[in-house]
Image (tube, rainbow, N blue to C red):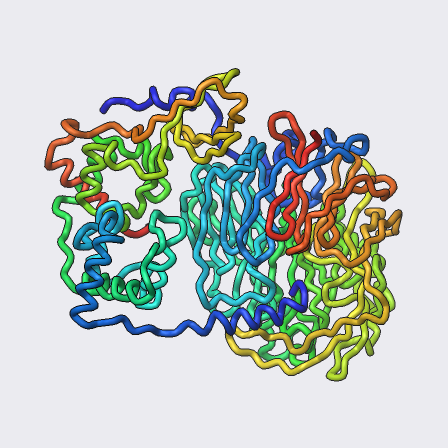
Amino acid sequence: MRSLMWLFAPAVLLAQINVPYERIRDADKEPGNWLTYSRDYSGQRYSPLDQINAGNVGKLRVAWMRQVDELDTVETSPIVVDGTLFITAPPNVVEALDAATGRTLWSYRKDIPGDLRMCCGKVNRGLAILGNTLYYASVDAHLIALDARTGVLRWDVTMADYKTGYSSTGAPLAVKDKIITGMAGGEYGTRGFIDGYDAKTGKRLWRFNTIPVKGEPGNETWEGESWKTGSATTWVTGAYDPESNTVYWGTGNPGPDWNGEVRKGDNLYSDCLIALDPDTGAKKWHFQYTPHDMNDWDSTQTPILAHGMVVLANRNGFYYALNQNTGKFIAGRAYVKQTWATGLDEAGRVMRVPAAMPTPEGTLIWPSLAGGSNWYSSTYNPKTDLYYVNVKEMAAIYIRGDAEYKAGAQFNGGGQTDYKEEEPYGAVRALEVATGQLRWEYKLHSPSHSGLMTTAGGLVFGSNGTSFFALDAQKGGLLWRFETGGGGGIDANPISYMSGGKQYVAIAAGHALLVFSVE
Amino acid sequence: MKWAPLLVLSAMAALAAGTETKIKLPASRADLLRGEKLFQVNCARCHGAKGEGSRGPALTRPKLPHAPDDAALVKVINDGIRGTEMPGAGAMSDHEVRQTAAYVRSLGKVPMKPVPGDPAHGAEVYRGKGNCAGCHTINGEGGVAGPDLTTIGAARSGAYLRESIVDPQAAVPEDFLLVTVVPKNGASVTGIRVNEDSFSIQVRDGSGRSYSFWKSDVERLDKQKGKSPMPSYKGQLSDAELTDLVAYLASLKERK
């Protein structure tokens, strides 16, 4: 057969999209790319790029934008490989975009079942890449592998049955030859898990159930049969330490959310950080931030590895630093107003105020169910040695209601009403990473729902409502801002990358992805 | 849960989603005849005069994957199928769409004509003499220069597949364009155009690598309209080999 090589001759000499594990592990060697959810495995969401810095950030302009013709918000955190951006978009779309022009290279869409139910929108937060394959956890709880060059489906496996309330919204994590992924559905009486899949075939290699079965240690922390519908979902991407071969992954609220009467006990492993062996799925240790949660304070946000510690500002209002290898508590303190605890004891366990729990009449508690912060990214800058968090100063009146489990229906056991007597507000706060001690804050008119990214250019990028802005990482002063417009707030995390020798900053805002550069 | 007010919204959305009703298609002889006429005007170009399939899949089968029930079939005819070449009905009225749907359903009651040939031997031709996997992928194995063929048997008829192997230029998809970009600086690139606007063009070469060019940086843009990078297999394969290869491709209906 006559060869076709003449047609494609130049291509043979050029590199393909190919991201082996080593490239992700050594992400600092290629700071212009963004190869995993948080750029590297540490969860820091720190960009070593400094072309955009305090001196020129004022000249940041929109380079291009990508609109999405859907009602749900774009929450994607793009992956960037050698000039190609990979994004997810509602309702169930994956796209490859040219990083310099924003033009579409390919688009994949999976139809959504008509009877799919989700508590909080058909959203998705991103992807993983390994080799030349993209991995995407679709809203109907499938894990999907796509050819990164063409968008053609490689495989599609069902993680769980969406009809019983399971879904998926977080970006998977590629570790060595495996794809690790969580799930969502914490308001539907699901039973949470973290899965490990063979990246090549899609075969499930292990499942860590976040609620132990009868006979396993931890099951005794659930009264009666309540463990079967205890949720503890895993809807945000974890971090990974290659040296100790440990994955760190957070878990969500116990179900029903606000009625703890029907699930007495600590409810392990809800609201925990789980340290896992990614080869086997075996638990190395766990730390529970909110034992017997009655306020829907998921602990799913991406943890950050720094100085041998794993740190995070929890939704429950406290900042925690744990030993990265043992999970032992090192330090912690409240980083927002909270009224449900008198503090943390020596082991880091919260000392509850007994009356601060939901009641049929309603109980006023700080923080609100949206938490002191939420799923979106905090960020750590090794140059300033500061941890930055977008906080909500906000209370709620928590109400306990009846909870009856029905497969596929919401299983909340109550709710909250807003408390407006004291005006809620937001802030970006810089905390000392080892202690959580406040160094500075930049106050915001309203509580934010969006993540932060810090850069070697001495900047912290963040959002509030529809404003996207850059702060001075040292002192917290405002250096630049951009109004992304009404029609949908910013509910996503920023990233940064290089293309054609130029640094870009990207943020999903409302129903679009916006990409900025200095002219 | 992320944010409380969404609770209410999602409950409303769930109610709305649950209100899909069953529909009844018109069934008189006059309706079916009218449906057939409409089919010939609107659908036959891709699905064949009798629904036997061509560029579009054969409809002469009892189950249609995108239209498990009549309501879904009406929706497919009305709206098209996203991510495929199937467009929505243009100027048909609601009643006409239903008449067309009724005719399409009647096609599924006639037994399907099997594609002749030996698929197992066709698979050998695909891998060996034909060297098809150099450019095409089936179940994740193969090249990316040409279209993925994992489920090609569900999308194209045997006759269409045969034609596209013998005369690839006759089977170039509507939006397919082979281009050569000669930039002012650097090597030229030949590949498939994946996107283009007034200011830039994006091309994917045979190895799957994507390129983007600003038009202001381009010396020459050579568009090879109607040209396929696929060679003709006319005279390269025996008639029996061709028949078996088509039988193999026609058998590729589901992802493994």
Residue A265 location (% of width, % of height): 69, 75
Q: Residue at x 15, y 41 (%)?
A: B244
The N terminus of chain A sits in image quarter: top left
Query: On the picture, is B251 further left or further right than A151?
Result: left
The C terminus of chain A sits in image quarter: top right
Q: Is residue A324 visible?
A: no
Query: On the picture, is A95 further left or further right than A372?
Result: left
Which of B205 and A148 lies nearest the eye of the viewer?
B205
Which of A201 and B59 lies nearest the eye of the viewer?
B59
Furthest residue to the top? B185
Residue A88 location (% of width, % of height): 54, 48
How many discs mark residues in the rendered view?
0
Query: On the picture, is A274 further left or further right than B86?
Result: right
Q: Quadrant of residue B203?
A: top left
Q: Residue at x 53, y 38 (%)?
A: A97
Which of A477 and A136 lies nearest the eye of the viewer?
A477
Which of A470 and A261 lies nearest the eye of the viewer?
A470
From what the image shows, is residue A470 above or below residue A119?
above
Query: On the picture, is A387 further left or further right than B89?
Result: right
Q: Residue at x 16, y 29 (%)?
A: B234
From what the image shows, is residue B168 above or below residue A87?
above
From what the image shows, is residue B144 above or below residue A270?
above
Q: Is residue B17 visible?
A: yes
From what the image shows, is residue B117 above or below residue B134?
below
Q: Quadrant of residue A251?
A: bottom right
Residue B249 location (% of width, % of height): 23, 43
Residue A166 location (% of width, % of height): 52, 65
